[in-house]
Image: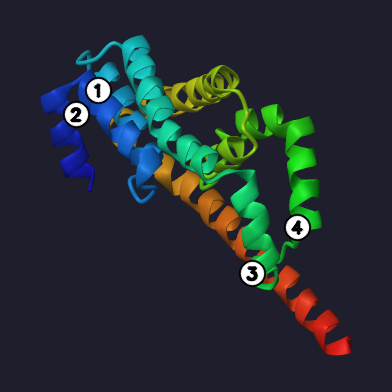
Amino acid sequence: MFEQLLGLVEQMGYWGLLALMFLENLFPPIPSELIMPLGGFLAAQGKMDPVLAVLFGTTGSVLGALPWYWLGHAFGRDRLFRLADRFGFIMTMDPPEVLQAFNWFDRHGRKAVLYGRLIPAIRTLISVPAGLASMSLPGFLALTTLGSLVWTSVLTAAGYLLESQYEQVQDYVDPVSKIVVFAVIAIYLWRLGRRLIIRRRN
C-alpha cells in the first residue's frame, strides 16, 4: 500500500492528499496514519509545503465526515427510537436509554466531536451521533475542522521528522486503533450479556 499511496500523492500532489483523506473517512481501511505522514515525508524532501499539506489533508478529512453526519441526520431521532423499541435487545438500548444518550450528547456533544476526531477508529463514527442529535452544521464543521487540523498536523509533523521511515507512524497508531475497536466490542458484549442474564431471571 505504501508504494501505491506514494505514487498517487506524487502524481496528484495536494489534491491527492485531499482525495485520500476524504476516502479515509468513508473507508477506514485506508489509514490516515499513512496518508498524512507521507505528506510530511514529501515536505521534508522539498516536494510539498507542509502547511499546504496540512490544509489540504484537513479539508479532505472534513469533507469525508459530512456524508456520515448527513446519514445520521437523515435517519433521525424518531427512527432510532422506533428501532430501539423493536430491536432494543440486540442494540442493548431501549428507548429510555436512547433518550439518555441524546440528553448526554446534547450536553457533551461538542467535546465528543472535537476529541473524537483525535481517536483512531472513532474519528469516522463520531459524525453519525452528531447527525442523529441534529447538531448544527456550522458547529459540527467548526469542531470537526479543529479536531482534524490537530490530527493532520501531528501526523504530518511525524512524517516530516521521520522522513523515509514515515511508515513507522502506523506502527504506533495501529495498536491504539485495535484497542479502541476491542473496547467497543467488549462493552457491547458486556451489555448484551447483562441483558441476557436479566431476561433469564425474569
Mark 1 or mark 4: name the one nearer the start of the chain.
Answer: 1
For the C terminus, which image quadrant? bottom right
Residue type indicated by callout 4? Pro
Q: Can residue 31 be seen in this view?
A: no
Would you call the spot at circle 3 few (<14 residues within 10 Å), some (14-19), or many (20 or more)? few
Q: Would you identify the image quadrant in which residue 44 lies? A: top left
Residue highlighted by disc 2: 9
Residue at image mark 3: 87
Which mark is in front, 1 or 4? 4
Position of 31 with respect to 122 (left or right) is left
**Element type at mark 1:** helix
Amino acid type at image mark 2: Val
Circle 4 is placed at which residue position? Answer: 95
Secondary structure of the residue carrying tag 3 is helix
Q: Where in the figure is residue 49, as x and y percent of width and height?
A: 29, 11
In primary-sequence order, the first of circles 4 and 2 is 2
162 relative to 120 in the view: left or right:
left
- Label 4 and label 2: CA atoms lie apart by 47 Å
